[in-house]
Image (cartoon, rainbow, N blue to C red):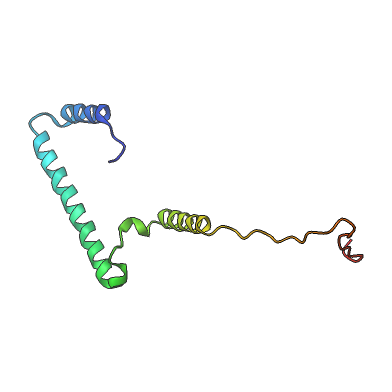
Amino acid sequence: MFGIGLPELAVIAFVAVIVFGPERLPEFARQAGRFVRQMRNLANTAQSQLREELGPEYADLKLTDLDPRQAIRKHILEAMEDDFDEPAPLPSYEVLSQDERPPYDDQAT
């Protein structure tokens, strides 16, 4: 979730036991759980209010869509997919006969 693996989590737990003590650690864990739950509820409420205010055309809106980096990445990928969907037209060339000279413009050179 935050890039924390099992070894890092074990070190954090060990430091927490040393700093807070084994008797106060369960209460701190409960408080941390309540805090995370409240933040999750706050984010979900804000997201649902934003969807209601924007209307039905934004029903599939996610909070990550509001991140400028994600929005730019999404639009660039969509543009790249559009480019690959339609092949570029090939240029047309006139075929000259053996004795025909190509056109020459004196003023262009």
Which residue is nearer to you in this view: 86 or 59? Answer: 86
The quadrant of the picture occupied by the N terminus is: top left
Residue occupying image coordinates x 9% and y 39%: 27
Instruction: Residue at the far left: name it.
Output: 23
Residue at left 26%, top 26%? 7
Residue 91: quadrant of the picture: bottom right
Q: Residue 101 in the image: x percent, y percent?
A: 89, 59
Looking at the picture, does residue 48 appear above or below residue 70? below
Please say if 18 is above or below 47: above
Residue found at the very far right of the displayed protein: 106
**Observer-nearest of 20 and 42:** 42
Number of marks in the rendered image: 0
Front residue of this view, candidates 56 and 11: 56
Q: Is residue 76 left or right of residue 100?
A: left
Q: Which quadrant of the view contains residue 51?
A: bottom left
Relative placement, left or right, of 60 versus 42 is right
Identify the residue at horizontal 13%, vertical 44% (top origin): 31
12 up-or-down from 81: above or below: above
In the rendered image, the quadrant that contains the C terminus is bottom right
Q: Which residue is pictured at 12% across the width and 29% down the height? A: 21
Q: Is residue 100 left or right of residue 50?
A: right
In percent of width and height, residue 100 lies at: 88, 60
Q: In which quarter of the image is residue 17?
A: top left
* Position in image of residue 71 (x %, y %): 42, 58
Residue with the most extreme front position: 98
